[in-house]
Image: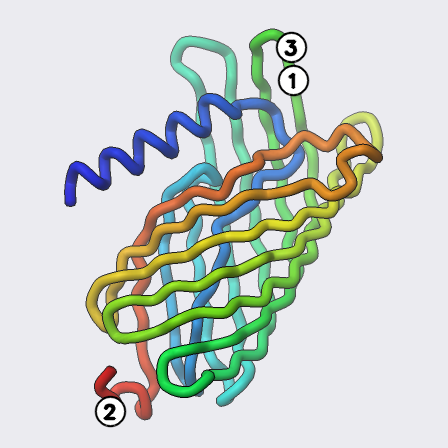
Amino acid sequence: MRQVFYIVVLFITTVFILNSCAPLYVPNVVNAPMLREKEELNVSGHLGISGFDAQGAYAVTDNFALMVNGSYLNSTSDSTSNYHKHIFVEAGIGYYKPIKKHFIFDVYGGYGIGKIHAFSTGLFSAYSNTYVNRFFVQPSFGFTSSYFEAAITPRSVVVFANDKTKPMTGFFIEPTLILKAGAPNLKFVAQLGLSFLINKYENDFDYQPFIVSIGLQYSLRGVETKSRNF
């Protein structure tokens, strides 16, 4: 298990280095809570290309839930003058619907704000110092059980970035695979996704094209779920 962890961390580091630039947008880890009933709570922490991501989701009723997410990274190269710093927070509301015993459909939408400050040298130097506003909609279809969960989430995002030269708008599609495994209340989480800029021919919107992370999720189930045996 330790070897797998080291391989994943090395992969994340390699991808970040190979794609180092001064992006106007870095996609955060997708929060796919897959809640099933009222009063269910999920909290999680993730390490990945977007840095450290903290997430939470709570089922307010039998079909509606709230979520809040945050992302933070402060990375400086020891051998060059390259650096990347960002902080981002967002909140959303969603609808979820269990389908029979083990399947779930949900859709969340929300809004977030953040700031990116980055500098990268190479064949061409790049610099960004921008505030970011973002709207997102993310439907998910997943499988849930006490020991394993999986979901496919094609998130759609509209990003407004106020760069040093002019305001820019990016429309993104971000298909992501989420896998969770472990105990009923504590699971390891892995994500692998891509971020596609739909309107790339309209502007020069620099962004991070990958979503890669590992993390831990703690779940506090509602009374009904505690009494079920999956």
The residue identified by callout 2 is 227
Q: What's the residue type where badge 2 is placed?
A: Ser
Label 1 close to label 3 by CB (< 8 Å) = yes
Question: What SS does tag 3 mark?
Answer: loop
Q: Amino acid at mark 3?
A: Phe
Per the model, the C-alpha gap separating discs 2 and 3 is 59 Å
Instruction: Report helix, strand or loop for mark 2.
Output: loop
Residue situated in front as seen by the camera: 140 or 85:
140
| Image spot of residue 76 (x, y percent) | 45, 22
**Mark nearer the viewer, 1 or 3:** 3
Residue at position x 44%, y 68% from top? 33
Image quadrant for the C terminus?
A: bottom left
Which residue is at 78% across, 41% downward?
A: 199
Query: Of the residues shown, which amino acid type is indicated by label 1?
Result: Ala
The residue carrying pointer 3 sits among few (fewer than 14), some (14 to 19) or many (20 or more) residues within 10 Å by Cα, namely few
Badge 3 is on which residue?
Answer: 124
| Residue 23 higher or lower than 189, as above or below | above
29 vs 151, nearest the viewer? 151
Query: Which quadrant of the structure image shows residue 223?
Result: bottom left
- Locate residue 153, reporting x and y percent: 53, 60
Residue placed most toward the observer, 182 or 67? 182
Residue at image location 46% in from the left, 75% down from the top: 58
Residue 35 image-quadrant placement: bottom left
Q: Which residue is mark 1?
A: 126
Residue at horizontal 15%, vertical 45%?
1
Name the mark nearer the viewer: 2 or 1: 2
- Give the side of residue 186 with respect to residue 170, left or right: left
